[in-house]
Amino acid sequence: MKLAHFYRTFRSFGIFFSFFFIISSAPLQLADAEKGRQMKSLRAQKVSPLPPPGNRGIKEAGMTNPDKLSEEQGKYLLGVARRTIENEILDRQQPRESDDDLPPTFLEERGTFVTLTIGGGLRGCIGHIIAQESLIEGIRVNAINAAFRDPRFRPLSKKEWKKVHIEISILTDPKPLSYSDADDLLRKLRPGIDGVIIKKGYHQSTFLPQVWEQLPRKEEFLNHLCLKAGLGGDAWKKGDLQVSTYQVQAFEE
């Protein structure tokens, strides 16, 4: 299946997958030219970044207990995201909430994504794969970014705000995946569990674990991930890509 047809097919199903990730660390730094290609590609993609609620257990399967948040903690962070956006959109001059009494987990550096949807359609999604701040600060920052700074959308309006559905994703730190050849790489990838980052020179891209739902075959998943990075679809077969994996825990309203 050609890539263009793949994206048209996803659009026809009304599924959205596109996100803009903000990264400052050297291992994931993009050259300006490659970044431009990535952004153009991301705007063209329309596949959902978050699966149906019933599948969240699959995404969490690869996470160790210390990485996991409780449902109560997830609901609290959803509330933080909603209050942060609401204060901004309604121009409320609220004092910043104190972090002094928060559980230590919220103060750990974690990668985060905040996704906004309206009627099932993507309305904004921005996050950090590599942690740049504490978990709770990442939720605040990316809530504002998703609502008002996603370059694919105009800033969220008061009228739209009433219809917005918020989802947050908490990421584990990416870890290098060592492999000997293409067959070994296929054996080690875990569909539905691993988010995957590939890198070769200035070429790089990532798919969140949720993309396995649209691309369940490992070969197809890697083909499209390579194409997204501006490489040939079979680049993963050559065995010279840097590969890292991470896992996601998601909460939604």
Image (cartoon, rainbow, N blue to C red):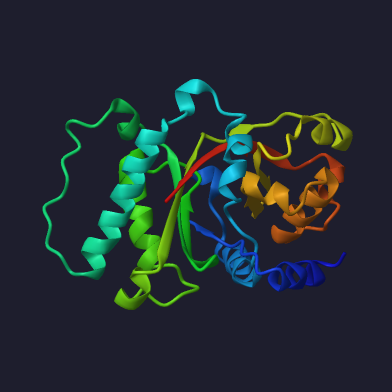
| Horizontal side, residue 163 vs residue 45: left or right | left
Residue sitting farthest toward the top: 65
Please state which of residues 249 and 185 is positioned toward the viewer in this rendering. 249
| Horizontal side, residue 192 vs residue 233: left or right | left
Question: Is residue 133 visible to us here?
Answer: no
Q: Residue at x 82, y 36 (%)?
A: 186
Residue 220 location (% of width, % of height): 83, 51
Which quadrant of the figure has residue 133? top left
Residue 141 location (% of width, % of height): 33, 53
Q: Residue at x 39, y 39 (%)?
A: 74
Residue 85 location (% of width, % of height): 29, 61
Residue sitting farthest toward the front: 54
Which quadrant of the figure has residue 232? bottom right
* Residue 245 to residue 210: above or below: above
* Residue 28 to residue 224: above or below: above
| Horizontal side, residue 221 vs residue 150: left or right | right
Q: Residue at x 58, y 62 (%)?
A: 18
Question: Is residue 145 visible to us here?
Answer: yes
| Horizontal side, residue 92 vs residue 83: left or right | left
**Image quarter in which the N terminus is found:** bottom right
Residue 106 location (% of width, % of height): 32, 34
Which quadrant of the figure has residue 143? bottom left
* Residue 222 to residue 65: above or below: below
Number of labels in the image equals: 0
